[in-house]
Image (spheres, helix red, strand yellow):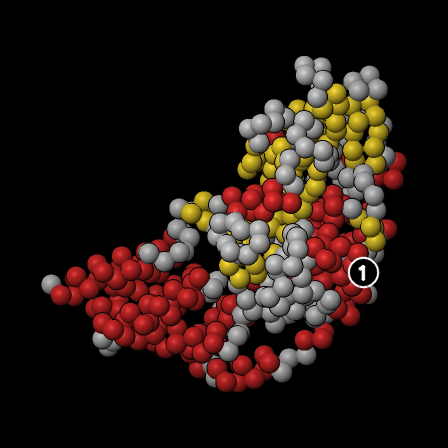
Amino acid sequence: MKKSIVFLLLITFIFGFSINSLASKSILVSKVAQDLVINSDLSNSEIKVFQSKLKKQIDANVDSELLLDLLQNKDINSFIKVVNKIEILKNNKIPSNKINQLLRLKDFEELNPEKIINEYKSADTTKYNTRQLRVNANYRVNLSDIHPKTGEMYWVPSNVLGTPDTKISELKKLIGKPKELQKEIDVLYEALAYIQVSNIRGVSGNIEIKNKRKDIEWEFPAPAEYSIKKNKANCAAMTNIINYLLHDDYEEVGSLWYHRSYILGDRRGGHVINYIKHKNKYYIFDALAYRQDKEHFSSPENGTTYSKGDKAGCIHEIVSIDGKPNFQPYIDFIINYNKNIAFISLISEYRYPVMGTGIADHNHDTDIYISDRINMKNINKIYDNPDDPQVLIEERVEVDLPLEYKDYKPYKNM
């Protein structure tokens, strides 16, 4: 009877953790609770301490699927030793992505934590670090109370999405070579490192071509391959570059596009940045902020300097509520710096689409057009200003395409 009560209390305690409602995590915590009570040698107070360790590790992005595999293949007391070893590594600032790599090794239980810590701290970080990126960065900063105040959202280093194995010297040899870069780069850290070491230049706006008959001004974003070869990019081109370099490396790689209102406030135009979906979590960042002239919009990966200005370039981890991503904190962040936002959308397309603007007959306002080559189902509007009537209008692009882009997707097939 006593064991049953303890088990129920543990289930309640574990499911109170702020974790995503993913099957692997649910199964993990449920099985751990049951095995701890029935099979472990721990007292009730020791069980609570252990549960606290496990909570911190899951919250810090230690892979629950890897932990679950270990638990299913070992007895509970062996699993306790694994979690205790992870605790030692975390206390010595070994990042979760490095721990996840070690967990995949069959002999994790036999690994010496002190040796791992010494090897990690003595690694030559100069082979990977850039002006803003730190290969050994290890932090997860809650931004809830940092200016601008938002709901729960976290600043994390880029290595959370994978540890680089391509050195800076190797990336430099690939400057201007899109196909080779796409093959070599497979984690976000490497993509951002390339932006830094290539010293990619800025360029103003997209190529604009007017359809005079329909009075639509079409804007053509530069293709990724073209931008890499020319080593220049604006926000749309930079978004295309990241999407191109990391295509098929994550669950989803796409664009976050926001546009200011034409009837509210006095600022016009839009901006596009990147998002990545990785292990069912969303990460949002502005890759343009890793261009040398825009670095004041990012921060060195030190876990301390986020509050000094608009840090859209920092990697923002979106928290899930009941298994669904809560984008509201990031929406609040954007609106803090752009008071007249009309809408914010996620675009899960490989290539950022052709957009256009034109005078609206129905209210003499400005309409926003989007090429009918895009699948509208891949545009997910996460914010719509109720005071702005703006809608997206699908339209066929009936103008000659920019000659310099004609050999690249998506223009090659238009």
Which residue is found at the position 27% from the left and 58% from the top?
A: 11
Q: Is residue 178 visible?
A: yes
Q: Could you say which quadrant of the image residue 397 lies in?
A: top right
Mark 1 belongs to which amino acid? Ser
Residue sitting nearer the eye, 371 or 290: 290
| Residue 243 placement, left or right of 95 | right
Residue beneath label 1, please? 198
Residue sitting nearer the eye, 182 or 341: 341
Which residue is found at the position 39% from the left and 76% from the top?
A: 84
| Residue 88 placement, left or right of 317 | left
Against 128, residue 352 (above or below) is above
Against 28, residue 333 (above or below) is above
- Locate residue 202, reporting x and y percent: 82, 50
- Locate residue 212, reporting x and y percent: 84, 19
Which residue is found at the position 82% from the left and 65% from the top?
A: 173
Which residue is found at the position 56% from the left and 84% from the top?
A: 118
| Residue 70 placement, left or right of 397 | left
